Image (cartoon, helix red, strand yellow):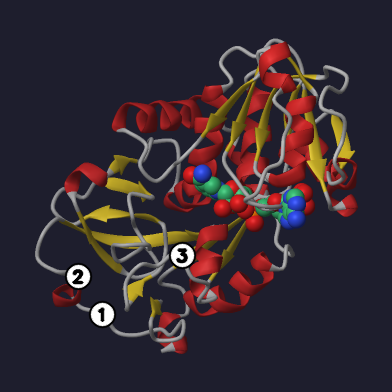
Amino acid sequence: MVKGSAGALVEIDEARLGGEGVLVDVSHSSLNYKDALAIAGRPGVIRADRLIAGIDLVGTRRDTGELVTVNGRGLGETHDGGLAELARVPEDWLTPVPERFTPAQAAAIGTAGYTAALCVLKLGDADGPVLVTGATGGVGSLAIMLLSSTGHEIAAVTGKPAEHDRLRELGASTILDRAEFEQPGKPLQPELWAGAVDTAGGTVLANVLSQTRYGGTVAACGLAASAEVHASMMPFILRGVALAGVNSVFTPRAERDAAWELLDRALDTSLLDAITTSITLADAVPTAQRMLAGQTTGRTIVDVHSSIAAAM
Ligand SMILES: NC(=O)c1ccc[n+]([C@@H]2O[C@H](COP(=O)([O-])OP(=O)(O)OC[C@H]3O[C@@H](n4cnc5c(N)ncnc54)[C@H](OP(=O)(O)O)[C@@H]3O)[C@@H](O)[C@H]2O)c1
């Protein structure tokens, strides 16, 4: 799947991938919000004239046979990405896939799951209910699953009434309508949350900060609502609330490993399977459009071998 060829499927060979790094026979990639932006040709993600899209890959090292994954690092942004059968990447980008995950499950975790884990780690030992926004999305769903299996009480914010039951199955005990968070609120609202994972930004984030308890942390990773935040200083200076940014692309090795260790320890793979949809490379373009229109839920993985012959 090459950007610069209008989301086209094209033949690639080793020469196309350059001469340095480890060759990985890719089995799966995934579709993240960022991939959807790139595939739709929106500016700001792919910073090259012509590049293979895909910020995640899972596959087998050709030299050792080890199952590995890469999340971020510039994959699908400045470096040829994972929506292909073959990749060549610097060796220090590779993370071994924990044994209990299949290649499809590692792809379903992908950047969304690993970002959710980074957010959960930022919350430390939040003592009380934790709020998750964008709850039916990839990051939100995985954050709920991780928080639930690490013993937290979870409130989920969603704009999708039809998904309430599924969010309860993932581990949320309270479901809140996203509309309640979309209007500007008072700077200091009732202290409800010991911590929060926010994927929305904008007014949603401002309200989340205003509802966070004294000393709580809000891990902010997304901008599904807006990149602009107009928030009061009051939660910071009167309640000591901390706003912790998360950038999964350039996360150092130690934090990356800690996130994958948390996923290995705490993720319920049967729930993960239940929120995963598998598509072909050829399906990536229409699925990206649906993702940008907010019509997808959970995780979408791309089985890069499925239907390739038919699509070419
Ligand atoms: N910082 C990082 O390293 C990093 C890594 C991964 C993702 N992200 C960002 O995190 C966000 C979520 O990523 P994702 O992969 O989970 O995307 P996703 O699967 O497309 O989910 C996004 C969710 O956000 C909610 N949403 C949609 N439109 C919204 C709006 N206008 N206001 C508030 N919420 C809205 C929806 O959930 P509900 O309908 O349930 O509300 C949607 O399912 C994106 O902005 C993505 O770019 C950042």
Question: In which image quadrant can residue 293 be found?
Answer: bottom right
- The residue carrying mark 1 is 12
Residue 189 in the figure: left or right of residue 16? right
Query: Tag 2: residue type?
Result: Leu
Q: Are marks 2 and 3 in contact (CB under 8 Å)?
A: no
Query: Which residue, as the protein is rendered here, is positioned at the far left?
Result: 19
The secondary structure type at the circle numbered 3 is loop
The numbered dot on residue 44 is: 3
Q: Reading the chain from its start, which is encountered first: label 2 or label 3?
A: 2
Residue 266 in view of the camera: no
Residue under label 2: 17
| Left or right of residue 172, residue 31 in this image | left
Q: Residues within 10 Å of mark 3 (few under 14, many from 20)?
A: few
In this view, the residue in front, 233 or 130, is 233
Q: Is residue 220 above or below residue 5?
A: above
CA gap, disc 1 to disc 3?
Answer: 24 Å
Q: Secondary structure at mark 1?
A: loop
Percent across and percent down for residue 242 are 60, 21
**Is there CB contact under 8 Å for labels 1 and 3?**
no
Mark 1 residue CB less than 8 A from any atom of ligand 1: no
Q: Quadrant of residue 277?
A: bottom right
Does the beta carbon of the residue at mark 3 sit less than 8 Å from ligand 1? no
Q: Residue at x 65, y 33 (%)?
A: 197
Label 2 close to label 1 by CB (< 8 Å): yes
Identify the residue at horizontal 36%, vertical 30% (top origin).
257
Which amino acid does the dot numbered 3 rest on? Gly
Distance from Cα at disc 2 to Cα at disc 1? 8 Å
Quadrant where the image shows the N terminus? bottom left
Identified at 42% across, 63% down, the residue is 54
Q: Nearer the viewer, residue 11 or 134?
A: 134
Using the rendered image of the protein, determine whether residue 225 is visible from the camera's viewpoint: yes
The mark nearer the N terminus, 2 or 1, is 1
